[in-house]
Image (spheres, rainbow, N blue to C red):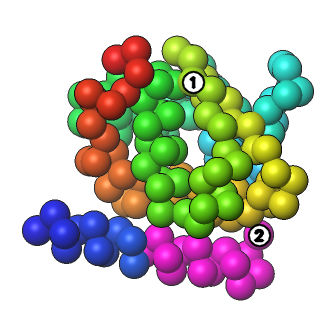
C-alpha cells in the first residue's frame, strides 16, 4: 500500500513539475510560503513560521502527524521534497533551520529559477504536502 501511495505521489509531483516546466512559472508572488530574505539578504528564500498565514495553512498538517512546527522539521520536509529533484538542484540548495524559520540558500545562479518551479507544486498542493509529511522520520530531524 505504501508503494502505491508513493507511486501516486511521485506521479502527481512529476505532473505538477511538468506543468511548471511547460510555461507556468512559479515565483515568490505565487509560491507560498517562500518569501524573500529581507532580514539578512543572504538567503534566496525564507519560510517564516511566525507568519499567521503559514501557521494557518500548514500547522494543522504538522499537528495531524504530531510533528513540531519548527524549522528543523521543515528542513526534513524540504529535504524529502528535494530528494526527487535532479542532482543540480540537490547539490546547490542549502537549508538553514531555526526554531521559527527555514532559510534557503541557492549556490548556483542557474538553480535559483528552477528551485521554486520544482518545490512550489509540492508546497501548494496540500495532498502532496500531506504525503511528504507521512514520510518524516522524527529520528532524522535535528534538534527534535
The N terminus sits in image quarter: bottom left
Compared with residue 59, is residue 144 higher up or lower down, i.e. above or below? above
Across and down, in percent, residue 88 comes to: 68, 61
Residue 97: give its label.
1
Q: Is residue 63 visible?
A: no
Residue 13 screen position, x and y as percent: 47, 70
Under circle 1, the secondary element is: strand
Say which quarter of the image contains residue 101: top right
Marker count (numbered): 2
Q: Which residues are magenta?
A: 12-25
- Which is nearer the N-term, disc 1 or disc 2? 2
Q: Residue at x 51, y 44 (%)?
A: 78
Q: Nearer the viewer, residue 8 or 96?
A: 96
Name which residue lies at 29% across and 74% down: 7
Magenta: predominant secondary structure element?
helix
| Nearest-to-viewer mark from 1 and 2 | 1
SS state under label 2: loop
Q: Which mark is residue 25?
A: 2
What percent of the width, then of the height, locates residue 9?
A: 35, 68
* In-image side of 63 versus 142 (left or right): left
Can you tell which mark lies on residue 39? none
- Label 2 near label 1: C-beta < 8 Å? no
Q: Nearer the viewer, residue 32 or 84?
A: 84
Amino acid at each position: 500500500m505504501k508503494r502505491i501511495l508513493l507511486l501516486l505521489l511521485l506521479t502527481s509531483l512529476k505532473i505538477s513539475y511538468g506543468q511548471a516546466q511547460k510555461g507556468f512559472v512559479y515565483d515568490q508572488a505565487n509560491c507560498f510560503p517562500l518569501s524573500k530574505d529581507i532580514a539578512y539578504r543572504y538567503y534566496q528564500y525564507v519560510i517564516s513560521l511566525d507568519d499567521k498565514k503559514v501557521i494557518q495553512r500548514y500547522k494543522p498538517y504538522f499537528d495531524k502527524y504530531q510533528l513540531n512546527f519548527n524549522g528543523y522539521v521543515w528542513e526534513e520536509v524540504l529535504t524529502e521534497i528535494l530528494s526527487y529533484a535532479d542532482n543540480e538542484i540537490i547539490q546547490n540548495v542549502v537549508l538553514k533551520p531555526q526554531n521559527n524559520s527555514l532559510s534557503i540558500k541557492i549556490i548556483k545562479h542557474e538553480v535559483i529559477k528552477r528551485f521554486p518551479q520544482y518545490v512550489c507544486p509540492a508546497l501548494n498542493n496540500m495532498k502532496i504536502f500531506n504525503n511528504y509529511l507521512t514520510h518524516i522520520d522524527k529520528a532524522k530531524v535535528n534538534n527534535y
